[in-house]
Amino acid sequence: MAKKDGKKRGSKPAGKRGSKPGGKSAGKSGGTSVPSVSDLLRVPAGTVDLAGLRTKPGPGPKDEAAARNEIASIAERLSELQERLYAQGRAGGSRRLLLVCQGMDTSGKGGVMRHVVGLMDPQGCAITAFKAPTKEELAHDFLWRIRLRLPGPGMVGVFDRSHYEDVLVVRVRELAPRPVVSRRYATINRFEQRLVDSGTTVVKVMLHLSAAEQRRRLLDRLDDPSKHWKYNPRDVDERALWQPYREAYEIALEKCNTPAAPWYVVPSDAKWYRDWAITRLLVEHLEAMDLGWPAATFDVAAERARVESS
């Protein structure tokens, strides 16, 4: 492996800033309380070695049935929290949440959109899938197209790939000079800090997949005619660059793992565990925002009397 670029590395008052997610989770799995998923999956400060981080299920539900049951049990809570956020945005609040999903091909970004983001009200969500930049996008700085897709007040924004492609595929494929790529980490950190300062909760997840599981999923797409549309021959070309991509991810995780916008590495060999973990991450971060229902801007009693007499 080549040397890396640097090794150091109830209703409550509406609009009130919440604490960072952490501590024991109120959720149950197998009859016992589980630690905060935010604590379990948050990337520690310093050097990152993805080979040392699990891709298979970790603490939490022990099988798919238990995971799906727990997701179903907290789906209503997730929906209510998102509605509170949306209501605050409609009432003039500035809070919003941005979920950033990154991962190797077949790691399950599309599955997260269907099985996790799909639990929320679509009118309060905005999903953007970033592809190779267009000529117009290439004519601007690399964050230009990202800024255009940031969530508005009260919204949950979801990025299927993101600004990190410009320090991942751009680095691996040498689409920009290495000094240019190296400067982008600090630019990203400043960008994300400004987002947080303006009221955005940033949740960055890396879907951590093993090479063996990726191979199995690619073969599964070839074996099933209903999945041929998902298969892209270029995925095999990218797979040949597994080690350079892993190194690029490790560098990005190290350099852009800040207190304001930390990274979470989600074991993704089991789709059910991936979905469970990200659902819990969203609930924990929305709960930490300390969201309340906006206060009425009219006389409730007077309006009740008007409705009753109408």
Image (cartoon, grey):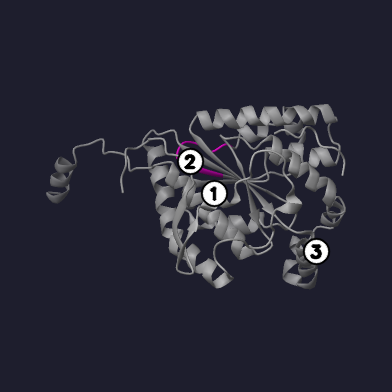
Magenta-span inclusion, residue 152: yes
Which residues make up the magenta segment?
150-157
For mark 2, give the secondary structure: loop
Considering only vertical position in the picture, is 187 above or below 200? above
Upstream in sequence: badge 3 or badge 1: 1
Asked whether, in this view, residue 72 is left or right of residue 47, the answer is: left
Upstream in sequence: badge 1 or badge 2: 2
Q: Quadrant of the N terminus?
A: top right
| Number of the label disc, if any, that sits on residue 215 | 3
The residue pinned by badge 2 equals: 20
Question: Residue at horizontal 74%, vertical 44%?
Answer: 249
How far from the left and from the top, in percent, is residue 219?
80, 68
The answer to which of 7 and 282 lies nearer the viewer is 7
Considering only vertical position in the picture, is 190 above or below 215? above
Whether residue 132 appears in this view of the structure is no
Disc 3 versus disc 1: nearer the observer: 1
The residue pinned by badge 1 equals: 38
Cα distance between the residues tagged 3 and 1: 29 Å
Query: For the stretch drawn in magenta, what is the main secondary structure?
Result: loop
State yes or no: discs 3 and 2 in contact (Cβ < 8 Å).
no
Q: Amino acid at mark 2?
A: Lys
Q: Amino acid at mark 1?
A: Ser
Asked whether, in this view, residue 168 is left or right of residue 34, the answer is: right
| Number of the label disc, if any, that sits on residue 217 | none
